[in-house]
Amino acid sequence: MQEPANKGGPGGEKPRVFLCFTSAEITDLLAFALDRHFDVELRSFTTAKDLLAALQNGPPSLLAIDGTREETSVLLEAAVATQVKTVIHHPKKQAPSVEGVNLVGVFNEPELLPGISEALRSLGAGIKNADHAASNPTYPYFRVGVPLLLRTNPLVADVFLKLSELKYIKLFHKGAGFSSEDVAKYHAAKKIEHFYIMATEADGVTAKLNEALEQLLREVPLPVAVSTQVSMATIDTVHSLVNQVGFTPEVQRLVKNNVELVIQEMYGSPSLAAILSNLNLDREKYIASHSHMLAEVTCAMSIAMKWDSDVSFKKITMAALMHDMGLSNQKLARVKDLKELNDRSSEFNPSEAEDYRSHPRRAAVMIKGMKEVPADVDKIILQHHELPMGTGFPEAINHVHIHPLASLMMVAHDLVDWVIDHPGPDPLVEAFIEAHADKYKIGNFRKILKALYSLQG
C-alpha cells in the first residue's frame, strides 16, 4: 500500500522533494539552494532505478527530473501513476511525451530554481533565513567584480567562472595570483564582469576585501577612477553576499568602508554638474552603478540645501548605497513605482513583484540591525518610494511625515533616472525641474527643486 503524498502546508509535515538529474552538479546545486532556503525534506537520486523504488514506497510532495535522459518516459509514467506534482528540466522547454503528468512546469536552466521554488511556496513550505535580503533561493556562489578581485592577491579562496545557471568551472586556485594579465584575458577580451566564490568561503573573502578597501582609503590623493570602479564592484558584491550568507559583521564592515570611499570621492569633486556630466551607467549592473551615482548626486544636492554636515553625508551615502539591497533583479530595480509594476506585470512573476513591494522595508530592517549607524538611515531607506501626496509605498505617508533627507534622496533618485533616460552631453537639469515641478510642489520637495535650480546659475 502506498503512503499518501506529502502535501505539506500549515500544520502538516515538511514537504518532501525528490531530485533526479543526470548531472550530479545540477543535483548538488539545487539541493544546496533549496535546503538553505526552504524547510523541506530533500532526497537526491543518481539513477532512475533508485528513484522508481523510492516512488513505489511513497510519492513525495514534488518531483524534479531531467527531461532529456533515456529513462524520462519511464519516470513520467511512474509520476502519472502516483499523481505527484512534477517539475521537468529541459533546455528547449519541450513538453513531456507522456500524457496525464501532474505538471508544475517545464523549465530551462535560468527558470529551474525559481520554478521549483514557486511550487514549494504553493505547497506551503516554510522559509528559512528570512532575514536575508532576497526572498528567493540562490545557488551556492557569490559574485565578486574584477576590480575587487584584482586587489585581493593572493587569492584566499578558489575562484570560479560561471558558464551557465547550473555550471561553474574553477579557474584559479586558492593562493594563486590574479594579475592585470588575467584582467586583460578575461575582462577586456572576453567581457567577463564577475567571478564566483563558494558561499562557504565568505568570511575569509570578505575580510580580505575589507583589507583592500581600507588600503585604498589610505591612498593620498584618492585615485578616483579606481575607487569608483571598486565602489560599484563592492555594492554588487555586497548584494550577492547578503543573498547568500546574510548581513554578517564582515559584510557590514564592507558597507561601512564603501560609504567612506564614496564620501572621500565626494569631497574631492562635490560639483553636481561634474557628477552628472560624468555619469556612465552600466545598464547590466544597474543596481550598483545607480546606487553609486545616487549617493554622489544626493550629497551634491545636500550642499545646495546646506544640509551638508559630515553626519548628513554619511546618512545619505549609506542610504543610497543600501536602498535597493532587497532586490537582485536588475530590470526590477529600474521600476519607478507600483503603477509601473502593475503596468509591467507580465514581465515579473508574483515572487518578484512581492520582492519589489517589500524591498524598502527589508533593506531598512537590515540597516537597523547594524551597529554604529547614524540615526534615521533606516527611515530614509524605508521612505525612498513614498510620494509627497501620500500615494507611495510601503506606508503611503505624505510630505509632512517624510524625513527631509529621504525627500532629498527621492528627488535625487528621479534626477539620476532622468539623466539616464535622456542621455547626451547636457544633463538637462532644467528640463527635469520643469517635468517634476507638479510632483514636487509642496513642503521640502519644493525647496529642494528651488535649490537644484539655483545650481544652474
Image: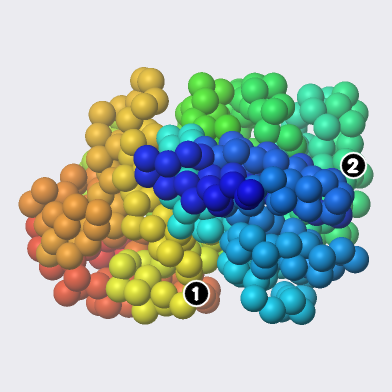
Task: Please identify the quarter of the rendering in which residue 103 is found.
Answer: bottom right
Task: Give the percent coordinates (x, y) of residue 120.
Answer: 52, 52
Question: Callout 2: 10 Å neighbours few (<14), some, many (20+)?
Answer: few
Q: Nearer the viewer, mark 1 or mark 2?
A: 1
Q: Nearer the viewer, residue 92 or 379?
A: 92
Which residue matches tag 2? Answer: 171
Which residue matches tag 1? Answer: 347
Amino acid on which the number 1 mark rests in the picture: Glu
What residue is rendered at 37% in x and 44% in y?
Answer: 10
Q: Regarding mark 2 in the picture, which secondary structure is present there? A: strand
Q: Which mark is residue 206?
A: none
What residue is rendered at 24% in x and 58% in y?
Answer: 393
Disc 1/disc 2 C-alpha distance (Å): 35 Å
Q: Regarding mark 1 in the picture, which secondary structure is present there? A: helix
The C terminus appears in which quarter of the rendering? bottom left
Task: Give the percent coordinates (x, y) of residue 389.
Answer: 12, 64
In the picture, measured across the screen, residue 222 lies left or right of residue 67, that is left
Which mark is first along the chain, 2 or 1?
A: 2
368 over 266 or under it: above or below: above
22 over 67 or under it: above or below: above
Colour setup of the view? rainbow
